[in-house]
Amino acid sequence: MQHWDPKQYAEHARFVSDLGVPVLQLLAPQAGETVLDVGCGDGALTTKLIELGCTVVGVDASTEMVAAAKSLGVNALSMDAEALAFESTFDAVFSNAALHWVKNPERAVAAVWRALKPGGRFVGELGGYGNLATIITAIYTALAARGVTASNPWYFPRPEEYRKLLEAQGFLIKHLALNPRPTRLPGSLNGWLDMFAQPYTAAMAINERPGFVADVVELVRPTLQEADGNWIADYVRLRFWASKPSEFAVSQVPRE
């Protein structure tokens, strides 16, 4: 139910890769390292890893995004995060703004674990608890007014929930924190909803979707639109750094 259009993404969501740079800095990639980018999208952030001298593989569930990433020179593959086809291959696994689309996070974490070499690190950011709360409340209000039901497509975990998940797999956690990050959108909220709220709009007839989007916009306007007309999305991000231990690495991974 979620279709990714690289041109639409570049117009309405380029901030996603731009604001992923601090996550990349947390990864601290080194030249010569092998890195897997899970949910690479159109490759805009993946190319920065390549520029730093890493050997990178990008994977994404969207064939359209994979094609866009390949056009930038990324070694990109169409692959689901829950079924990564790698075994002890990478020094690091990186993911920005993708894992909250994965409905079986345990399987994704297990797949990342298998893909990492012993001593490798898993660094990323996803939507966390409270992410888009205002927008989601408005979505369900507008759905209820139409008598339409739809399942939440996103996974926004609490920090303690994601910590438990990572540690159950065996990861050692150096950093894990929830960060409110109100984000100014580059265009209209209508455009953002057209792109990101497709799992909800798909639950109704095509001719009903513009009215639904307009209703959501009006519900959140008093809270999320600034006086100058710009829109602020109520993002909350969960950022983490974890490692797959080895005999060498266990004593060297600092704890919080």
Image (tube, rainbow, N blue to C red):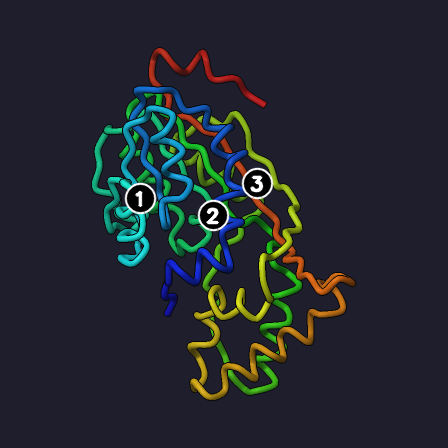
Amino acid type at mark 1: Leu
Neighbourhood count class around disc 1 (C-alpha, 10 Å): few under 14, some 14–19, many 20 upward: some
Compared to residue 211, the image places residue 21 above or below, namely above
Mark 3 to mark 2: distance in Å? 19 Å
Residue beneath disc 1: 72
Amino acid type at mark 3: Glu
Q: Earlier in the sequence, mark 1 or mark 3?
A: 1
Secondary structure type for disc 2: loop
Secondary structure type for disc 3: helix
Q: Nearer the viewer, residue 87 or 166?
A: 87
Compared to residue 89, the image places residue 231 above or below, namely below
Q: Residue at x 54, y 87 (%)?
A: 147
In front of the other: label 1 or label 3? 1
Q: Position of residue 12 (x, y in %)?
A: 51, 59
Q: Nearer the viewer, residue 92 or 5?
A: 5
Q: Position of residue 132 (x, y in %)?
A: 61, 59
Residue 205, by quadrant, is bottom left
Q: Position of residue 189 (x, y in %)?
A: 60, 67
Mark 1 to mark 3: distance in Å? 37 Å
Q: Position of residue 239 (x, y in %)?
A: 54, 38
Amino acid type at mark 2: Ala
Residue beneath disc 2: 97
Q: Residue at x 26, y 57 (%)?
A: 63
Residue 216, by quadrant, is bottom right
Q: Residue at x 44, y 36 (%)?
A: 166
Q: Earlier in the sequence, mark 1 or mark 2?
A: 1
In front of the other: label 3 or label 2? 2
Q: Is residue 23 left or right of residue 188?
A: left
Secondary structure type for disc 1: loop
Count of numbered circles in the view: 3
Residue beneath disc 3: 160
Say whether marks 1 and 3 touch (CB < 8 Å). no
